[in-house]
């Protein structure tokens, strides 16, 4: 499966439909709205507004579709959901275009405004939805006929695991699960599934199995005596970018925990990793990129001043870079202005404290105003970090924290940030216990994530820095 190529198909047809719609709509305006004699006139003049529209209108629609989350999970699309998502996104886009570009049109009566709005909505929806419907229908047919599938493993090896495997395999229309093996709860020698699927390892190997076999879905199928393990397994998979499903009991179905995405599928509970609505997730990404780019350009004179300050304050490099752990446990290189002497960690990694002798005098100034973290905007621009999110830590300290507080791994659901709720509320942590204490604020952030909360944290961070407090 080539997800990039498949996404490009949708993008190209969306661009083509936006261009076609703008041309048809422009002709309609000139021949039916702005022609006060109400005669069909093919002698149409193409104003600068038309050419601006050719460039910016398709880009506007693509950005709106992206923000709505349409290009996410490109293979897993319900045609009914696609219909409603396409309609409501285009309705919002039509309203925006109408009030920003069409209200100043020359019209003979206000009734013409209703005509303009309705025609733009109809043209855009029809020309956008039909290609989408065709592509999605072809893709779904390939999935239903097992020509296209997602690498899936089962966690479990007894009766329940065999039953769920057997049910899914015998479904007349596949929902895309391509079973490549199973992971056993323990290391016992024989299991029911071994006659049908290869054993890929035991539970402690599951992360390695997911990475090695490019697993996209995990189905947890445990016996009733093993249900206490479900929570542990979900926590274990929390930092992996996979779809996790659990066998549903009748109680779960009655309580409304089971959402059926396919009418032919076996009832399973899908563990949701969506912490914010998709439009907020995409908007957050756009804000991160825009602000980071703006900051790098605007603060370039300050970068030069800080570079000179660091160079004059002590021997060594201007920038300090080292590996931190990001979203889904993926390591990345973090960049900061060096605020410590070059041999600061000659005896191994250690946390800094308020009166740390390893920090240079200029480094203390930078840390107090958080200027040493300005290069973090480069990490945000690259997509390793966000403006707001739990502060990234080194694996050396994460391993120690996870021993005392296993729920720390929940933080790896999201990108780390330049500022965080934990940092603004608690400040720097100089011990592992203090890091664990700060953890509760970051967990609260994840449970309450929204653009509104992000804006509050950013404002609070700015106010705290201006007051001269250490965060």
Image (cartoon, rainbow, N blue to C red):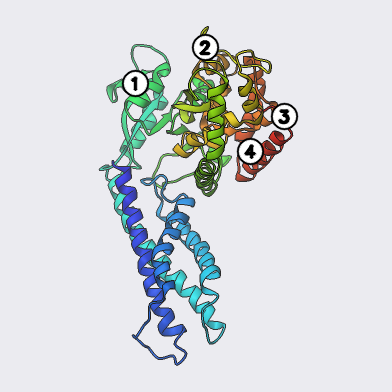
Marks 4 and 3 sit apart, C-alpha to C-alpha, by 25 Å
Query: Looking at the image, is mark 1 or mark 2 earlier in the sequence?
Result: 1
Q: Which residue is mark 3?
A: 469
In the displayed structure, 97 sits above or below 226; it is: below
Label 3 element class: loop
Marks 4 and 2 sit apart, C-alpha to C-alpha, by 40 Å
Considering depth in this image, is 18 or 225 the residue closer to the camera? 18
Marks 4 and 1 sit apart, C-alpha to C-alpha, by 42 Å
Q: Nearer the viewer, mark 1 or mark 2?
A: 2
- Label 3: how many Cα within 10 Å (few below 14, some 14–19, many 20+): few
Residue 338 shows up from this direction? no
In the displayed structure, 40 sits above or below 387; it is: below
Q: Nearer the viewer, mark 1 or mark 3?
A: 3
Q: Which residue is mark 1?
A: 192
Residue 207 shows up from this direction? yes
> Residue, x 36% and y 46% (percent of image)?
75
Q: Which residue is mark 4?
A: 448
In the displayed structure, 95 sits above or below 207; it is: below
Query: Looking at the image, is mark 1 or mark 3 earlier in the sequence?
Result: 1
> Residue, x 25% and y 43% (percent of image)?
147
- Label 4: how many Cα within 10 Å (few below 14, some 14–19, many 20+): some
Query: Looking at the image, is mark 4 or mark 1 earlier in the sequence?
Result: 1
User: What mark, if any, has residue 343 been given in the picture?
Assistant: 2
Q: Are marks 4 and 1 in contact (CB under 8 Å)?
A: no
Could you say where residue 112 lies in the image, as x and y percent from the top left? 52, 82
Label 4 element class: loop
């Amino acid at each position: 499966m080539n997800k990039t190529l498949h996404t490009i198909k949708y993008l190209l047809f969306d661009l083509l439909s936006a261009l076609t719609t703008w041309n048809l709509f422009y002709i309609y305006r000139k021949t039916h709205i702005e022609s006060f004699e109400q005669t069909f006139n093919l002698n149409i003049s193409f104003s600068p507004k038309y050419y601006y529209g050719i460039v910016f209108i398709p880009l506007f629609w693509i950005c709106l579709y992206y923000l709505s989350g349409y290009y996410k999970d490109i293979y897993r699309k319900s045609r009914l959901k696609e219909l409603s998502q396409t309609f409501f996104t285009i309705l919002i886009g039509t309203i925006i275009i109408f009030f920003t570009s069409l209200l100043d049109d020359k019209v003979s009566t206000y009734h013409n405004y209703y005509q303009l709005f309705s025609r733009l909505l109809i043209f855009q929806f029809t020309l956008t939805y039909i290609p989408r419907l065709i592509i999605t229908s072809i893709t779904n047919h390939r999935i239903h006929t097992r020509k296209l599938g997602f690498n899936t493993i089962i966690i479990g090896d007894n009766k329940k695991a065999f039953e769920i495997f057997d049910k899914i395999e015998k479904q007349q229309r596949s929902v895309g699960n391509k079973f490549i093996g199973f992971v056993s709860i323990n290391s016992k020698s024989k299991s029911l599934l071994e006659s049908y699927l290869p054993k890929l390892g035991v539970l402690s190997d599951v992360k390695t199995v997911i990475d090695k076999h490019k697993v996209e879905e995990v189905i947890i199928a445990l016996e009733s005596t093993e249900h206490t393990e479900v929570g542990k397994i979900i926590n274990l998979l929390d930092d992996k970018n996979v779809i996790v499903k659990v066998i549903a009991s009748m109680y779960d179905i009655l309580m409304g925990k089971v959402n059926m995405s396919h009418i032919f599928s076996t009832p399973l509970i899908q563990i949701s990793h969506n912490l914010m609505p998709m439009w907020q997730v995409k908007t957050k990404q756009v804000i991160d990129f825009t602000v980071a780019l703006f900051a790098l350009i605007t603060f370039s004179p300050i970068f030069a001043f800080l570079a000179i300050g660091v160079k004059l304050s002590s021997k060594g490099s201007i920038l300090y870079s080292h590996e931190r752990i990001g979203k889904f446990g993926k390591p990345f290189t973090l960049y900061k202005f060096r605020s410590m002497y070059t041999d600061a960690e000659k005896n191994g990694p250690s946390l800094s404290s308020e009166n740390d002798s390893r920090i240079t005098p200029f480094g203390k100034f930078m840390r107090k105003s958080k200027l040493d973290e300005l290069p973090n905007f480069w990490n945000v621009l690259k997509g390793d970090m966000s403006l707001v999110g739990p502060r990234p830590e080194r694996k050396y300290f994460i391993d120690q924290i996870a021993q005392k507080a296993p729920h720390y791994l929940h933080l790896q659901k999201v990108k780390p940030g330049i500022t965080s709720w934990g940092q603004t509320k608690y400040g720097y942590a100089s011990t592992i216990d203090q890091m664990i204490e700060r953890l509760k604020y970051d967990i609260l952030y994840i449970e309450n994530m929204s653009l509104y909360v992000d804006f509050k944290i950013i404002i609070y961070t700015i106010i705290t820095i201006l007051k001269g407090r250490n965060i």
